[in-house]
Amino acid sequence: MILNHISIGTQDVVKAVAFYDSVLSTLSITQSHYIENVAAAYGEQYEFWVGSPCEGKASASNGAHVAFNAPSKESVDLFYSVAIELGATCEGKPGLRPEYGETYYAAFVRDLDGNKIEAVFN
């Protein structure tokens, strides 16, 4: 991994943590650190963070997204369905993406704050 970590902002830490706890568990990713009402981290090395930005107002980036490795195609499907059930919006249903590789299977959603996230099995 060339990055130390990725952080995304949220307007509501409690709701975002509940969302990410459920959605990332479909990919066998668990919360590894929590600062009450400030932020949560996921992954063994705290690679992914969700929290309240220092400036106070979170906004989603256009063109950027975070992709999480999935252990199987079925986990990509589950990631997508759980995210949608919890209020995410569809940005690309689960399926093959041959433009990224012959076996690239992924799904894209926007979280509760509009951040674009992806689950990918390759």
Image (cartoon, rainbow, N blue to C red):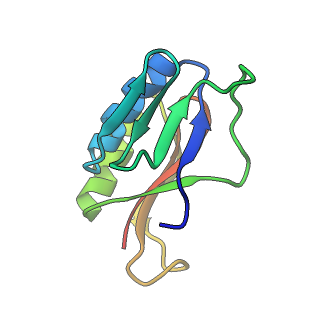
Residue beneath the point at 33% across and 36% down: 31
Which image quadrant: the C terminus? bottom left
75 in relation to 61, above or below: below
Can you give x and y, in whole percent of width and height, for residue 61 in the image? 71, 44
Can you give x and y, in whole percent of width and height, for residue 62 in the image? 73, 48
Residue beneath the point at 59% across and 38% down: 8
Quarter location, residue 46: top left
How many numbered marks appear? 0
Residue beneath the point at 27% across and 54% down: 75
Quarter location, residue 121: bottom left
29 in relation to 58, above or below: below
Side of 54 relative to 45 (left or right): right
Q: Name the one closer to the observer, 55 or 121.
A: 55
29 in relation to 70, above or below: above
Residue beneath the point at 62% across and 35% down: 114
Can you give x and y, in whole percent of width and height, for residue 87 in the image? 46, 28
Side of 86 relative to 61 (left or right): left
Can you give x and y, in whole percent of width and height, for residue 98 in the image? 49, 79
